């Protein structure tokens, strides 16, 4: 091989080696940057996963509290309904008694007025 050709081949090899070193340096910098970004995403994912787990726990607790409170409200409604039913029955009985007493008093007043007219 001629010396010119050898010099050209050596120059190309040096250029390829320089480009390879530069490419490798650029690739390493890019890879390191990606590693950092992946690390941040992974940390945020773990934080988010913990937050979701906490929210699920809170949601379960809230559901249980609501079930208990709904049960208590239902019990109170049943009790209140029973009290209202008793009160309505008592008021109905009192009204019936008042109507009977009123009818008796009206009849008595009518008899008294009739008696007074006939005198």
Image (spheres, rainbow, N blue to C red):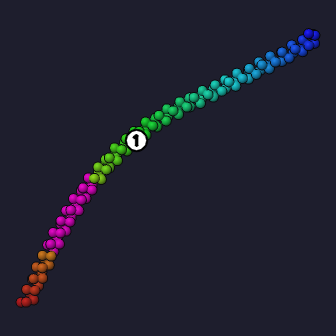
Find disc 1 in the rendering and name its residue: 62
Residue lying farthest left? 119
Residue 44's spot in the image, x, y percent? 56, 31
User: Which residue is rendered at x = 7% and y = 86% of the image?
Assistant: 115
Q: Quadrant of the N terminus?
A: top right
Residue 111's spot in the image, x, y percent? 9, 82
Whether residue 64 appears in magenta in the rendering, the answer is no
Q: Residue 116 sits in which quadrant?
A: bottom left
Relative side of 108 to 5, left or right: left
| Span shown in magenta | 79-102
Mark 1, other Cα within 10 Å: few <14 / some 14–19 / many ≥20: few
User: Which residue is rendered at x = 70% and y = 25% of the image?
Assistant: 30
Tell me if residue 70 comes above or below residue 82 in the rendering.
Answer: above
Residue 118's spot in the image, x, y percent? 7, 89
Residue 113's spot in the image, x, y percent? 11, 85
Residue lying farthest front? 1
Relative side of 22 to 110, left or right: right
The main secondary structure of the magenta stretch is helix
Tell me if residue 76 comes above or below residue 57 in the rendering.
Answer: below
Relative side of 24 to 64, left or right: right
Relative side of 85 to 115, left or right: right
Q: Residue 99 sits in which quadrant?
A: bottom left
Whether residue 97 appears in magenta in the rendering, the answer is yes
The answer to which of 16 and 109 lies nearer the viewer is 16
User: Which residue is rendered at x = 21% and y = 59% of the image?
Assistant: 86
SS type, badge 1: helix
């Amino acid at each position: 091989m001629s010396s010119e050709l050898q010099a050209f081949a050596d120059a190309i090899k040096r250029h390829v080696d320089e480009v390879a070193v530069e490419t490798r340096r650029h690739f390493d910098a890019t890879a390191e940057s990606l590693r950092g970004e992946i690390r941040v995403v992974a940390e945020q994912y773990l934080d988010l996963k913990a937050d979701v787990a906490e929210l699920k726990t809170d949601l379960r607790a809230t559901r249980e509290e609501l079930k208990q409170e709904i049960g208590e409200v239902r019990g109170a409604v049943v009790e209140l309904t029973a009290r209202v039913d008793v009160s309505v029955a008592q008021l109905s009985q009192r009204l019936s008694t008042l109507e009977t007493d009123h009818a008796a008093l009206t009849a008595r007043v009518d008899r008294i007025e009739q008696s007074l007219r006939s005198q």
